[in-house]
Amino acid sequence: MALKVQKFGGTSVADIERIKNVADRVINTQNQGDQVVVVLSAMAGVTDSLIALAHEAAETPSARELDVLLSTGEQTTAALLAMMLTHRGYKAKSLLGFQAGILTDMTSGKARIRDIDGARIQELLDQNYIVVVAGFQGRDTVGDITTLGRGGSDTSAVAIASAIKADVCEIYTDVDGVYTTDPRICNKAKKINKISYEEMLEMAILGAKVLQIRSVEFAKKYNVPVHVRSSFNQEEGTMVVNESADMESVVVSGITCDKNEARITLRKVPDQPGISARVFGLLAEAEIMVDMIIQNTRSDGETDLTFTVTKDDFKKAVELSKKAAKEVDAKEIVTADHIAKVSVIGLGMKSNSGVAATMFEALAKENINIRLISTSEIRISCVIEEKYAELAVRVLHTAFGLDQAINE
């Protein structure tokens, strides 16, 4: 008998018929002798509709009340599934986030989980209940409802799995696993049978939308095996697990593309201590996330400071950069928002040379100019013009041999 946490996303519970399909799958799991905890998202589109309603009610809705409102989406799907399971003769009980013991910090809209008391869930499992938990939510230290931000149900599921020591956390979605790249961009993309936490985390950070970043961090920290699979078929998906020796035999596991990038350069900045701290301090105060940072010292003793932000933060980042430029006596600001970041990821990079050369040569053959480069132990990222992004993905997919199936 295994203990499984099964999470179903918005498309999997988009309407009553799909919730019935979820009920079928959950019942099948329990009939096999397994214990089941189900974590649900809101129906597809419901969260956006609730946000729109909030802005009709108030131009700037209270963050606290917005959390109360948004949490009702997951509450609805959890109650509906529990009703269906009970109607079909199975013991089922729905729990809201706070009832499931999820304690968060006090940051409305993007709270982080501090602790989970899994006692209530375990008590119900011991009584042979199917436990249905509303994802995306918890409570803070003063008892207020909080939400975990976009994709928060993934984080809820993995965190619960770690708290109750589940054997596996199954993430059911509208794709049947993690692919070597986005199949919508490259029709030669292949499903990966097994991928490490490190690789999955890099792919999530760099634009892959299969798993939410914080859920992968949780899984890695607490060693929770995650199985990404489709809710619309019975096929095995992709296992996200600890690194194993055989994984390094594949030099590059995946290619990602992120078009949500913009570049800002402060030119001719004085080359002296404290300049970077001032520029990035202003951005940090505004909670603007900076991605790539490149600093080039010029022959005249001055420096060019280049960094990237998301397009969502671009306008605000430019305003703050202009303010910083005046303070640090930069001579000019140059911006670009028609860029994209293309990355290659793989554990095999740790023990194989020549990955960068292969990447740069493949892009050069297509006359794709590289604007910025950044690296980690298992990743190389290049900023290029946005119009070449999809071509770059296809070219790199071929260059690293990913057109053929891997993990076979």
Image (cartoon, rainbow, N blue to C red):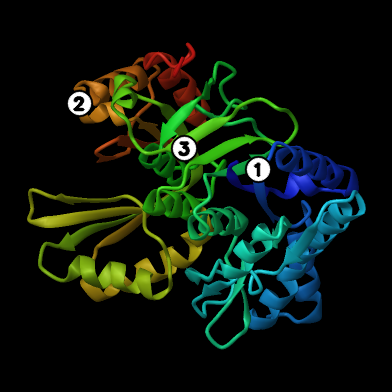
- Real-space Cα separation, disc 3 to disc 1, in angstroms: 21 Å
Q: Are marks 3 and 1 in contact (CB under 8 Å)?
A: no
Number of marks present in the image shown: 3
Q: Which residue is mark 3?
A: 240
Label 3: element kind: strand
**Residue at position x 38%, y 15% in the image:** 399
- Circles 2 and 1: CB atoms closer than 8 Å: no
Q: Is residue 210 left or right of residue 286?
A: right
Q: Amino acid at mark 2?
A: Ser
Q: Residue furthest top?
A: 404
Looking at the picture, how far across and down is residue 47, in whole percent? 74, 61
Mark closer to the observer (2, 3)? 3
- Residue 45: image location, x then y, percent: 78, 54
Mark 2 vs mark 1, foreground winner is: 1
Q: Is residue 359 left or right of residue 122?
A: left
Looking at the rendered structure, the kind of residue marked 3 is Val
| Residue neighbourhood size for the residue with mark 2, other residues' Cα within 10 Å, grouped as few (<14), some (14–19), many (≥20) | few
Of circles 3 and 1, the one toward us is 1
Counting residues from the start of the chain, the first of labels 2 and 3 encountered is: 3
Sequence order check, earlier mark of 2 and 1: 1
Disc 2: which residue: 351
Residue shown at the point (79%, 48%) measured from the top left: 13
Is disc 1 placed on a helix, strand or loop? Answer: loop
Residue 87 in the image: above or below residue 190: below
Q: Label 2, secondary structure: give it.
A: loop
Q: Position of residue 215 (x, y in %)?
A: 50, 53
Q: Can you identify the residue that label 1 sits on? A: 34
Sooner in the amino-acid sequence: mark 3 or mark 1 = 1
Q: Residue at point 52% right, 80% down?
A: 106
Of the pair 171 and 293, the residue shown nearer to us: 171
In the image, is residue 256 above or below residue 78? above
